[in-house]
Each structure stands twice: as structure tokens, then as C-alpha cells.
Image (cartoon, rainbow, N blue to C red):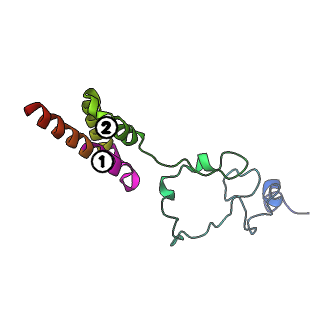
Amino acid sequence: MATPASSPSLAEAVAPYPGAGTGFPYASRGVDDRYGYAPANPAAVGFAAPHFPGTEYVNMGEVFADGGYTSPKPVTNPMAKTALWVSVFAIFGLPLIVGAVLAVIALVEAQKLPDRIGQHEAIAALIYDGIIAFVWTTISVL
């Protein structure tokens, strides 16, 4: 009969469920992994596959939140579109000032977005407001 000092303890002799001991590739490595799914030797971190352009701005929690795949919400600049629409009515006076202010705010906001989304609309609103202001000034001088 073996002495208690030379016999392995019960915790060493029996592997925790469902792992199969230290030689098993999914052994727990001392971490309390109840299900034995964490790999004992994770893959070496090396060169990752290139990611699809534009996905660095995607929140994966939103994409995979439901049961199926949902496409991410597109990145937009609603301030630029609003500035452009307000500038259309700049001929009436007050929308000229409001459209110019919105266009400047949208232009600053576009610098923070990927691919400067909304920059063209904001510049178009500023150009249109400038043309209308020039026409108003020319008419008032004459």
C-alpha cells in the first residue's frame, strides 16, 4: 500500500470536468475555466489577415447583437445635409446666416469623420451662401 506522502492527491489524480488533465490542449492552466474551452497554448500572435476597409469604425456589438447579421449603420453627416437644404432658402435672408453657420459647423465635424463625410455638402452650402450674399450685396448697392 502506498504511503499518503507518495500518492497523488485527489485533485491531481482526477482532471476537472470536462478537461482531460495537463496534457490536454484545453487544460485550464490554473485559471478557473469551468468548461475547459480556453486553449492552454493560444495561437501565437503574428501577422493578422488584413481587415476590410472601413470596418475599423464598426461597432461589432451592433452588428452581431441580434440573431442574424445586420449591416452597420452608415456613417453620415446630417449637419452638412441640413446646411445645404437651409442654404437653398438663403434667398429669403435669414436662412443665409443660418446656412452659413451650419455649413461651418458641418465642415469642422466632417474633419473628424472617416473619409471626411459631408465635406462636399458643407463646401457647396458655403459656396451657395457666398453667391447669394454677393447677389444681395450687388442688388442693395445698385
| Residue density around tag 2, few if under 14, some if 14–19, many if 20 or more, within 10 Å | many
Q: Quadrant of residue 125?
A: top left
| Residue labelled with disc 2 | 87
Is 34 on the left or on the right of 136, as rendered? right
Read off the magenta span: 109-126
Q: Residue furthest right?
A: 1
Quadrant where the image shows the N terminus: bottom right
- Magenta span has 42? no
The image shows residue 96, relative to residue 16, as above or below, that is above
- Magenta span has 122? yes
Residue 68 spot, x, y in % from top left: 71, 51
Q: Residue at x 47, y 48 (%)?
A: 75
Q: Residue at x 38, y 56 (%)?
A: 115
Cα separation, mark 2 vs mark 1, equals 9 Å
Q: Residue at x 77, y 53 (%)?
A: 35
| Residue density around tag 1, few if under 14, some if 14–19, many if 20 or more, within 10 Å | some
User: Contact, CB < 8 Å: mark 2 with mark 1?
Assistant: yes
Viewer-side residue, 38 vs 47: 47
N-term mark: 2 or 1: 2
The image shows residue 54, relative to residue 118, as above or below, that is below
Q: Which mark is residue 51?
A: none
Number of on-image labels: 2
Q: Main secondary structure of the magenta part?
A: helix
| Residue labelled with disc 1 | 124
Q: Quadrant of residue 14?
A: bottom right
Q: Residue at x 69, y 45 (%)?
A: 66
